[in-house]
Image (cartoon, grey):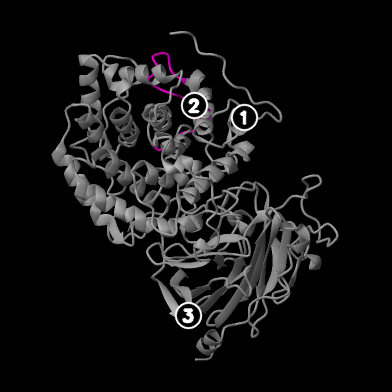
């Protein structure tokens, strides 16, 4: 083979070819995928079995498995392109790579998987590619086919796997071989699907794991379970029509919930782990079309197409997701190891290629022939989502979720932020802690933190002893009971926005303190940069419609009076829209300030500030906090002079809440 080209180099203000594509139709999305795949060429190994994406960071599995990720994950995109009749000049790189990687005599052999091995995950895109792109299997001779059979199917079927969405990966390993007449295990395939069906909870939702775990993040939809159910329904539907129809029925039902996770700007709501897979967040919608699902009313194919294409366009506006060589980086809107999981290698982000399932959808499908639409008033502005424990709202131009009850099954890095925050927003992403000392490092956006050591270490909500969607009259609320310390009991009630005060929601905490604790209740994090020059925000200037109140102070001058206001007066910051927080309770006096969060704590904005209410509760005290959180995102047609229009008019304390407080 010819020597690889030098590759893409993105210099100062360089624009990635991905961002230059005018996304309008199927052909433009094909071009977009090719712009994503092309920069990988210089990073293929000599025999093409591995792709070593730039980054050099370690991961919890071995380096070979990391480089297997590098070659297999982009296969999601390439396979979808080929399945839809497209062509790519580098297809042969992957064909040769599969031959070399599955050959035990080749020095680049991938190695047989052990129990719970990362290689099992990468068998899923390989199995799917074999199932839908016949050119791959047809390129193998008999010996090469045996190698693939031995590596893909027969090395995984008797291994232990995590009791999670991973079981789908073995299903697709077997399915890829089955579709090509290779050696596979129908018994194992059926057993795995039957077990995966035990994760189903109703309302279209599957949990990512067995009883005792409440985890319904993007793995329940676009990253794995719903997505792979739909692919299976498409590929195995003729042989297993009942199973296929059940998977499609679940997708129809859950679609009416998932539509609430995307805003009109093209952003999805970051929630949970692995959001570094970026545009994979919309793969569910392309899979609906691919599997031939009939959309439930009021959804239309124009709406579905709009969700996907607007999302891809939004990622085109995020220039810092790339390495200087044009490959995806670990992170979200910029390279960020603080938010990364311990299983994120430099090749992991290419799970994003799931988004290109839409390219396997025929050009005559209404997904492609329909004009893009916004959901508009066709879907409710406030919706209860009982299974994931969310209340979705889209009022005041703000797409957000209130959340209670979910938790990762183990204390992964930043898990309290990824699952335990009170609110998640498409405009104001969640923040993770870059360090473990002081509020600046903990970056408690949409969280209530407690410290019993004077403010060095902080604890927030991770697991709830009780969490439920309840009602107070016609109003849905989320109630959770949790303990940051064994003798500190918190009951939190989350009250959604309503049309009268669309940019506010309420957060009510009843706290019984068995020890003295400092508290910090944070609003959303917002960009801490002046528009004119990128320097930190000044005190608020109404003529510029930008700045903060009170002023931002550093971690070294916390006693500066100008940096504090009363809780009733609150604190706000205005840059890309406005966020703020006020205390509505009248029996205690909290103080408000701007926490200048450590850099790189937020997923989208690398420099942020968090309006925060602070207080100290004495040992033996019981208090009520009523926090009103303000958020009005910027957007097309929204003058910056209006960002604070609702700030002086927070919601009234509901009568039912007053009665609960007096009881």
Distance between the Cα atoms at labels 2 and 3?
A: 51 Å
Give percent across and percent down for residue 448.
Answer: 56, 67
Q: Nearer the viewer, residue 109 or 298?
A: 298
Mark 1 surroundings: few (<14), some (14-19) or many (≥20) residues within 10 A:
many
Q: Residue at x 71, y 55 (%)?
A: 637
Disc 2 target residue:
37
Mark 2 surroundings: few (<14), some (14-19) or many (≥20) residues within 10 A:
many
Mark 3 surroundings: few (<14), some (14-19) or many (≥20) residues within 10 A:
few
At numbered mark 2, what does the secondary structure look like: helix, strand or loop?
helix
Give percent across and percent down for residue 465.
Answer: 38, 70
On screen, residue 501 above or below 631: below
Disc 3 target residue:
474
The answer to whether residue 489 shows anywhere in this view is no
Give percent across and percent down for residue 493.
Answer: 50, 75
The answer to whether the residues at label 3 and label 1 have Cβ atoms under 8 Å apart is no
The mark nearer the N terminus, 2 or 1, is: 1
- Residue 663, disc: none
Residue 45 lies in the magenta-colored region: yes
The mark nearer the N terminus, 3 or 1, is: 1
The mark nearer the N terminus, 2 or 3, is: 2
Residue 79 lies in the magenta-colored region: no
Q: Is residue 430 left or right of residue 143?
A: right
- Residue 16, disc: 1
On screen, residue 466 above or below 328: below
Q: Nearer the viewer, residue 624 or 615?
A: 624
Q: Quadrant of the N terminus?
A: top left
Q: Is most of the magenta stretch helix, strand or loop?
A: loop
């Amino acid at each position: 083979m010819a020597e690889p080209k030098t590759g893409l180099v993105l210099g100062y203000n360089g624009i990635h070819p991905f961002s230059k594509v005018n996304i309008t139709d199927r052909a433009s999305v094909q071009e977009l995928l090719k712009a994503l795949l092309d920069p990988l060429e210089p990073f293929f190994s000599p025999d093409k079995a591995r792709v070593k994406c730039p980054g050099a960071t370690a991961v919890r599995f071995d380096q070979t498995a990391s480089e297997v990720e590098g070659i297999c994950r982009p296969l999601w995109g390439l396979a979808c392109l080929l399945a839809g009749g497209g062509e790519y000049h580098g297809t042969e790189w992957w064909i040769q790579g599969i031959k070399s990687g599955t050959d035990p005599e080749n020095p680049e052999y991938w190695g047989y998987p052990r129990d719970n091995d990362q290689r099992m995950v990468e068998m899923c895109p390989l199995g799917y590619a074999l199932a839908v792109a016949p050119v791959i299997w047809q390129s193998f001779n008999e010996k090469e086919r045996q190698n693939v059979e031995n590596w893909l199917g027969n090395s995984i079927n008797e291994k232990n796997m995590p009791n999670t969405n991973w079981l789908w990966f073995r299903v697709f390993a077997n399915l890829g071989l089955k579709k090509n007449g290779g050696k596979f295990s129908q018994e194992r395939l059926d057993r795995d699907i039957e077990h995966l069906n035990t994760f189903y909870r109703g309302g279209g939702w599957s949990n990512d794991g067995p009883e005792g775990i409440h985890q319904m993040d993007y793995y329940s939809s676009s990253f794995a379970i719903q997505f792979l159910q739909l692919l299976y329904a498409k590929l195995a539907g003729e042989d297993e029509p009942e199973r296929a129809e059940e998977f499609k029925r679940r997708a129809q039902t859950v679609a009416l919930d998932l539509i609430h996770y995307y805003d009109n700007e093209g952003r999805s709501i970051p929630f949970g782990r692995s959001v570094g897979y970026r545009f994979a967040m919309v793969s569910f919608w392309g899979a609906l079309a691919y599997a031939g699902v009939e959309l439930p009313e009021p959804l239309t194919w124009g709406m579905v197409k709009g969700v996907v294409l607007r999302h891809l366009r939004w990622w085109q506006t995020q220039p810092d997701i790339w390495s200087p060589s044009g490959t995806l980086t670990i992170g979200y809107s910029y390279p960020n190891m603080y938010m990364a999981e311990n299983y994120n290698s430099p090749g992991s982000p290419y799970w994003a290629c799931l988004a290109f399932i839409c390219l396997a959808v025929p050009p005559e499908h209404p997904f492609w022939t329909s004009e893009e639409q916004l959901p508009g008033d066709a879907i409710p502005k406030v919706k209860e989502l009982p299974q994931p424990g969310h209340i979705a709202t889209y009022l005041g131009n703000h797409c957000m979720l209130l959340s209670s009850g979910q938790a990762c099954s183990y204390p992964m890095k930043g898990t309290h932020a990824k699952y335990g925050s009170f609110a998640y927003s498409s405009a104001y992403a969640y923040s993770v802690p870059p360090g473990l000392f002081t509020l600046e490092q903990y970056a408690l956006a949409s969280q209530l933190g407690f410290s019993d050591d004077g403010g060095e270490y902080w604890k927030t909500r991770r697991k709830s002893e009780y969490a439920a969607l309840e009602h107070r009259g016609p109003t849905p609320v989320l109630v959770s009971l949790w303990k940051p310390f064994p003798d500190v009991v918190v009951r939190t009630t989350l009250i959604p926005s309503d049309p009268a005060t669309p940019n506010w929601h309420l957060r009510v905490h009843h706290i019984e303190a068995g020890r003295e604790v400092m508290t910090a209740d944070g609003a959303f994090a917002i960009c801490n940069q002046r528009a004119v020059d990128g320097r930190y925000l000044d005190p608020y200037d109404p003529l510029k419609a930008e700045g903060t109140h009170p002023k931002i102070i550093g971690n070294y001058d916390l006693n500066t009076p100008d940096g504090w206001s009363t809780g009733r007066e609150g604190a706000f910051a205005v840059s890309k829209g406005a966020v703020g927080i006020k205390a509505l309770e009248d029996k205690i006096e909290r103080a408000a300030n701007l926490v200048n969060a450590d850099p790189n704590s937020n997923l989208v904005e690398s420099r942020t500030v968090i309006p925060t209410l602070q207080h100290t509760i004495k040992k033996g005290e019981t208090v009520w906090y009523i926090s009103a959180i303000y958020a009005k995102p910027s957007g097309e047609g929204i003058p910056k002079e209006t960002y604070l229009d609702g700030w002086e008019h927070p919601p009234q304390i509901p009568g039912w809440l007053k009665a609960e407080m007096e009881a």
